[in-house]
Image: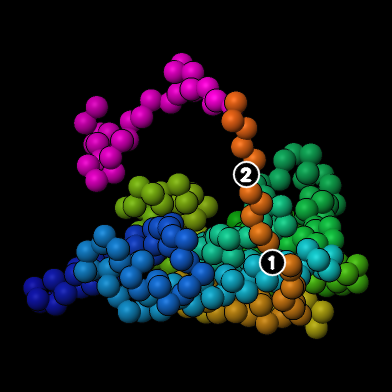
Amino acid sequence: MGRKKKDKEIAKQFELVYESILDDSEEEWEISEEEDNVDSIDKLYFRGHSNIYKDGKRVSYLKELIKLQVQLIKMQDWIKATGYKLVVIFEGRDAAGKGGVIKRITQRLNPRICRVVALSAPTEREKTQWYFQRYVQHLPAAGEIVLFDRSWYNRAGVERVMGFCTDEEYWEFLNTVPFFEKMICNSGIHLVKYWFSISDKEQEFRFNCRIHDPLKQWKLSPMDLESRVRWEDYTKAKEIMFEKTHSKHAPWHIILANNKKLARLNCISHLLSVVPYEEIKYEKVTLPQRKYNEGYRRNPNPPELLVKEVYTDLSNSRNLESN
């Protein structure tokens, strides 16, 4: 490879890494009190930032994301008002973007209505229970949304590939899932299942980002590294899972996820399309006038209870690493 071509490859990789860093930070920025007016994002998003952020695609993405989040709030209100029960399963290879879309779904929702279930490895006691038992307790009551960041399908994926279950347990699971999910649906729960699909090359890139980004290193586990070695085994397991567990009452929906932003928008848009929500009309809220007592005097805060103000001026942030 010539020097110029190699430099271009390095520059391209740097650009992709930089894009990934921006991607993780951008939705954390406050859009201010004007966030409901999506047309104001252009000026709000770039306020105080350099020209390098002025990317028309990024602005379009944020506009569409907020439009969808407005609809998610309407869906949430309808679910609460009607007692609807919704379960959404997010599956896919490591680094496929499941956590990113879950974050954008829950970002503006009420955590008392919409909650995320991300279970760790089963305890010794849980290993002796009926396999589905620890998941059942997290299913929603009336007026609730539950998002599973990985689910009972661990058995069809990581447990199968890594040898954490026997062949008998694996096939018993695949044969049982359709009946288990049929019972869930018959109980009045709407079950939606997503698989986030990424390419071999894209997963490699995202893993490298995690290795070199201190904000992402916690996401990279020894199991993730092993999954790179066993890419083809995961592919075979996924294909068998689709064949055995795709059903009319609980179908799989595949999200093409090489592009994180498009994957998020497409997933949220699809979710909104499969839930038959309607906008709930509320009476207009008027803020009541505060009552004043002429004799009331607010006492000053006790100095010993005040947190020391390390930051007093964000225009001249102090360097914590210098202390």
**Circle 2 is placed at which residue position?**
290
The amino acid type found where label 1 is placed reads Lys
Q: Is residue 266 left or right of residue 244?
A: left
- Tell me the CA gap for discs 2 and 1: 19 Å
Which quadrant does the C terminus fall into? top left
**Circle 1 is placed at which residue position?**
284
Quarter of the figure with residue 275 = bottom right
The boundaries of the magenta stretch are: 296-323
Q: Main secondary structure of the magenta part?
A: loop
Q: Is residue 174 left or right of residue 109?
A: right
Q: Is residue 113 left or right of residue 83?
A: left
Closer to the camera, 292 or 86? 292
Which marked residue is nearer to the observer: mark 2 or mark 1?
A: 2
Determine the residue positioned at 57% across, 75% down. Answer: 68
**Magenta stretch encompasses residue 321:** yes
Which x, y percent locates residue 21?
34, 60
Closer to the camera, 183 or 232? 183
Determine the residue positioned at 86% across, 71% down. Answer: 185
Which quadrant does the N terminus fall into? bottom left
**Magenta stretch encompasses residue 85:** no
Query: Which mark, residue 4?
Result: none
At label 1, counting other C-alpha atoms closer than 10 Å, the crowd grade (few under 14, some 14-19, many 20 or more) is few
Determine the residue positioned at 36% across, 79% down. Answer: 57
